[in-house]
Image (spheres, rainbow, N blue to C red):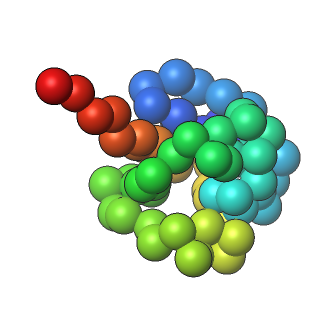
Amino acid sequence: MTIIVNGNSKVFQDGVTLLEILKELALVDKVMAAAVNMEIVKQDEWDKKVLQDNDKLELLDFVGGG
């Protein structure tokens, strides 16, 4: 199935969870917030959130500046 990750199409297995996507993309320790179809998914629910074909996933990290 296809998931749009930060504007880029990527192919994943059916029934993949948000956490599995983060692991596959090596982003588990880098992502601070995630939204699926513009809805924030709490970090403690990443392992339960199953994505569907054509879902839009936005992964955010926070960068300090000065």
- The front one of 37 and 20 is 20
Where does the image place residue 24, in percent across and percent down from the top left? Answer: 79, 40
The quadrant the N terminus occupies is top right
Q: Is residue 59 above or below residue 45?
A: above
Q: Left or right of 55: which side holds 40?
A: left
Where does the image place residue 59, in percent across and percent down from the top left? Answer: 46, 42
Where does the image place residue 3, in percent across and percent down from the top left? Answer: 60, 39
Where does the image place residue 44, in percent across and percent down from the top left? Answer: 57, 76
Residue under the point 69% across and 58% down: 19
Q: Quadrant of residue 45?
A: bottom right
- The front one of 14 and 47 is 47
Q: Left or right of 58: which side holds 22?
A: right
Q: Is residue 6 above or below residue 14?
A: above
Residue under the point 42% across and 54% down: 33
Can residue 24 be seen from the camera position used here?
A: yes
- The front one of 5 and 53 is 5
Residue under the point 53% across and 34% down: 5
Residue under the point 16% across and 25% down: 66
Q: Left or right of 57: which side holds 12?
A: right
Furthest-right residue in view? Answer: 13
Q: Is residue 56 above or below residue 11?
A: below
Can residue 56 be seen from the camera position used here?
A: no
Q: Quadrant of residue 39?
A: bottom left
